[in-house]
Amino acid sequence: MRAVAASPRGAPSPSRCLLALVLVLATGALSAAPVAEFQTSYAKPVAEEYQIYYEELAREHFLESVAQELNHVLALPQPLTLEIAECGHSTTRWDLQRHTVTVCYEFLDAVLAIAGDAAPSQSRAEQLFSGAVTFALLTEVGRALVGLYELPVPQGALAAGDEFAAITLASAERNGDPSAAAAVEFFDDALRKPDSGFEYLETHRFDRTRLETVACILYGNAPANHAASIERGVVARNRAPRCAEEVVAVASAWDRYLKSHTRGPSAAAAAPPSTAPH
């Protein structure tokens, strides 16, 4: 997405790197039978300062790009809407009753502020923003899949959502998408600012332990791209050698969860090889 000079703090809008969205992303032949799909909605904000997000994300068909990739892969039991809306809180959410995943305008604004403060340049701020928004949206999609498919996730829906986001970003990273490392760096920065008022961390109980698990999955997938996770202490040095095994285990688990819900090849197509990852 183009940088937006008129954005609230002069920082860029999210990049369209938002999706090689490949939990499975080998596109198989679609079923001839009609199936429920991911849908999209952009709620026009009341607050004027959020208008720029509304206009730019809708213009760039941000949600549509995500929904399209997901619809290539997953057959839903009922429609699920991806929306951007004003919520009153700087977070994201999954609503089982409404079958809606929501990215709040307040969340976008808070992420933009943290990324702008942490990054040494506008281009890096854009990358951090894009990585954080990508990760948060995919986390909510993962939570939604747990609820819609009634998946038996022993670690709980929040942690399962983290895993879904991590392995999807890991797969996209192998195709050149930089969101994975940017997401880890952003949340590391956010956790260093506990008084920032960034409500996502509290509503999702997202702490250092959860970040380390996400970062370990991504490090195990592509160590060369995530050396900073070791240097910054996001992933403990004694855990790093086991991360290659962790990413394979997580991808294999999601393969089992989704194998009866995919339209084409399953998540194993996106999993790193069981030998040393590249």
Image: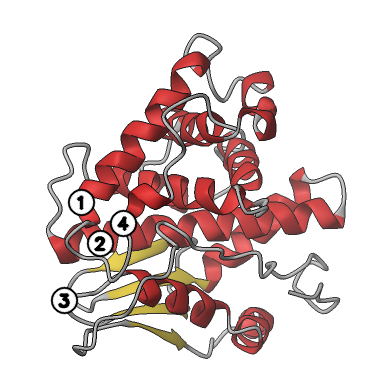
Gap between marks 1 and 3 measured at Cα: 15 Å
Query: Which x, y percent locates residue 126?
Result: 75, 59
Residue bearing mark 4: 266
**For the point 16% across and 76% down, which residue is it?**
77
Residue bearing mark 3: 77
Check the picture and name the quadrant holding the N terminus.
bottom right
Q: Are marks 1 and 2 in contact (CB under 8 Å)?
A: yes
Q: Name the mark nearer the viewer: 1 or 4.
A: 4
Q: Are marks 1 and 4 in contact (CB under 8 Å)?
A: no
Answer with mark 3 or mark 4, whichever residue precedes in sequence.
Answer: 3
Q: Is residue 115 left or right of residue 230?
A: right
Q: Is residue 79 above or below residue 123?
A: below
Query: Which x, y percent locates residue 85?
Result: 46, 79
Query: Which x, y percent locates residue 278?
Result: 60, 33
Gap between marks 1 and 4 measured at Cα: 10 Å
Which is more toward the observer, 6 or 139?
A: 139
Secondary structure state at the residue bearing disc 3: loop
Location of residue 52 by image quarter = bottom right
Q: Are marks 4 and 2 in contact (CB under 8 Å)?
A: no
Residue bearing mark 2: 145
Answer with mark 1 or mark 3, whichever residue precedes in sequence.
Answer: 3
Q: In this rendering, does residue 204 appear at all?
A: no
**For the point 51% across and 50% down, which residue is it?**
171
Answer with mark 4 or mark 2, whichever residue precedes in sequence.
Answer: 2
**For the point 65% across and 60% down, which residue is it?**
130
Say which amino acid is labelled 3.
Pro
Say which amino acid is labelled 2.
Leu
Say which amino acid is labelled 1.
Tyr
**For the point 65% across and 89% down, which residue is it?**
59
Which is more toward the observer, 42 or 107?
A: 42
Residue bearing mark 1: 257
